[in-house]
Amino acid sequence: GDSVTQTEGPVTVSESESLIINCTYSATSIAYPNLFWYVRYPGEGLQLLLKVITAGQKGSSRGFEATYNKETTSFHLQKASVQESDSAVYYCALGDRSTNTGKLTFGDGTVLTVKP
Amino acid sequence: DPKIIQKPKYLVAVTGSEKILICEQYLGHNAMYWYRQSAKKPLEFMFSYSYQKLMDNQTASSRFQPQSSKKNHLDLQITALKPDDSATYFCASSQFRTDANTEVFFGKGTRLTVV
């Protein structure tokens, strides 16, 4: 089946340090994967951080970026300089462009704590 | 203002009982979904509804029954509750289109504990 594997947390970094959260996927039943990063801030619901639907392209939002690499089946999330407000749980997710439904396959989530 | 309202936020139920989780969305979307996140497990897709019709069901147990009384409502009825049903249940919605990808929006979840 389809699956997503991401960096096992918790991850703790200091403010202004760089960050990478790894995400790899297996899309055995999906011909045209869409890739997403969702984030859940404390006390909030899950919200979309960025998405990429075409292999080789990069998505970016709020200083975060991720490149859809079809060869390595990866979609790592990076930020050059994190802030304390980035503390949250980050989820990598896989969708199906051919059906365009809201059915997403999620990774386990990575808890990020940014120390001041 | 929250655009997807889930009620209640927390719920404690006795084994064998029945509960209904409420979800309303005010985004004007035509598709709604339920996801579940159990302890130590990723978010799992359960159901999708579009125009109040079931589109996809990934839940093996018939104890879980979505109910859609209005286009912007998708409640989840769970019968004969078991401790293993303890999880946070997330409602979500999107504007389903065949020609483009649209964002899936999530509610804040209902945390269900079965004792």
Image (tube, coloured by chain):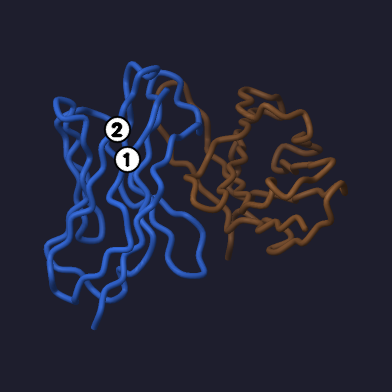
Chain colours: A blue, B brown
Compared across the picture, whether B16 is left or right of A64 comes to right
Is residue B107 or residue A5 the one in the foreground?
A5
Vertical side of B93 occupied by A43: above or below: below
Give the residue at mark 2: A25
Is residue B36 or residue A81 the one in the foreground?
B36
Q: Can you give x and y, in whole percent of width and height, for residue A62 in the image?
A: 25, 60
Q: Can you give x and y, in whole percent of width and height, for residue A84 in the image?
A: 28, 76
Q: Are marks 2 and 1 in contact (CB under 8 Å)?
A: yes
Q: Residue at x 41, y 22 (%)?
A: B99
Q: Amino acid at mark 2?
A: Tyr
Chain label for disc 1: A
- Dot placed on the residue nearer the N-terminal end, 2 or 1: 1
Q: Can you give x and y, in whole percent of width and height, for residue B28 in the image?
A: 60, 43
- Measured in 3D between alpha carbons, the distance from the residue under mark 2 to the one under mark 1, in whole angstroms, is 6 Å
Vertical side of B114 occupied by B54: above or below: above
Question: Which quadrant of the view contains residue A39?
Answer: bottom left
Give the residue at mark 1: A5
Q: Residue at x 42, y 22 (%)?
A: A1
Chain label for disc 2: A
Q: Amino acid at mark 1?
A: Thr
Residue count near mark 1 (Cα–Cα under 10 Å), binned few <14, some 14–19, many ≥20:
some
